[in-house]
Amino acid sequence: MLVSFFIGFMLALVVILAVACRKLTALYKATQTAWLKLDSRLKNRGELLPLLALSAAAWPEVDRALIYALKNLREDCRQANTLPRRIACEKEVTCKLKQIFTAVQNNTALQQDPPFIKLQRTLILAEHHAERAKRRYNNAVRDFNTLAHTIPLNLLAAMFELSPREYFDFQESLPKSH
């Protein structure tokens, strides 16, 4: 009787650990997938920066240093090899975009310029896509980190070298609707 109870207990423990391991790896893969989508959205946003810099070069209200900084930020973000550096770079992009769009609000001619309006709408759409991808990534990270910090799952996570993921946080640069 005691032997069958022990065997049943061990079998139940193995099943629970297998399910937990599967859930941990699934959540870890979800964070990786969400990161790839976020990275793609941020790169799409970055592809618009040279166009915006070129367009902004014709505006007398915009500081030339801002234009050059905006132009170089795309490459800086691509070369960021750690998440904290990438977040800092994306925050810098956000700051520069805010400065550009503040200058646009002061120029009524630009607000009526069809090519610029099209670029602005494209940039707003790219920003919204990046925001959505950021939320999905952060949600996946939250779910994984919560499960990976739960006892005894933290031992499984350590055994399979599934380290906690970092959140990706940056501020919005553009208005919600236009």
Image (tube, rainbow, N blue to C red):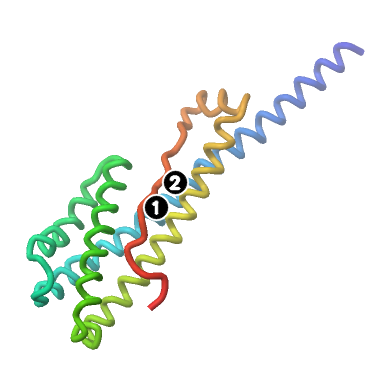
Q: Which residue lies furthest to the right in this view?
A: 1
Q: Which residue corresponds to the image point at 31% horizontal and 47% vertical from the top-left? A: 87
Question: In this rendering, would 156 be left or right of 71?
Answer: right
Depth check: give the residue in front, 137 or 62.
62
User: Residue 94 or 142: which is nearer the viewer?
Assistant: 94
Q: In which quarter of the image is the C terminus?
A: bottom left
**Mark 2, residues whose alpha carbon is within 10 Å: few (<14), some, or many (≥20)?**
some
Indicate the position of residue 169 as horizontal and vertical percent values. Answer: 39, 49
Q: Where is residue 33 in the image (x, y as percent from the top left)?
A: 45, 50
Extreme front residue here?
106
Q: Decide: is 123 above or below 159.
A: below
Secondary element at image label 1:
helix
Q: What residue type is labelled 1?
A: Leu
Indicate which disc residue 32 carries: 2
Residue 138: image location, x then y, percent: 47, 48
Front-lying residue, 5 or 145? 145
Going 37% across and 70% down the picture, which residue do you hit? 175
Residue 107 picture quarter: bottom left
Q: Which residue is nearer to you in this view: 54 or 64?
A: 64
| 79 sits to left or right of 60 | right
Q: What residue type is labelled 2?
A: Gln
Count of marks placed on residues:
2
- The residue positioned farthest toward the top in the image shown: 2
Q: Is residue 96 left or right of residue 173?
A: left
How packed mark 1 is, by other alpha carbons closer than 10 Å (few <14, some 14-19, many 20 or more), is some
Q: Name the residue under label 1.
A: 36
User: Which residue is at 39% across, 55% downward?
Assistant: 38
For numbered disc 2, what is the local secondary structure? helix
- Circles 2 and 1: CB atoms closer than 8 Å: yes
Query: Mark 2 and mark 1: span between their CA atoms?
Result: 6 Å
- Quick one: quadrant of the N terminus? top right
Q: Where is residue 133 in the image (x, y as percent from the top left)?
A: 44, 58
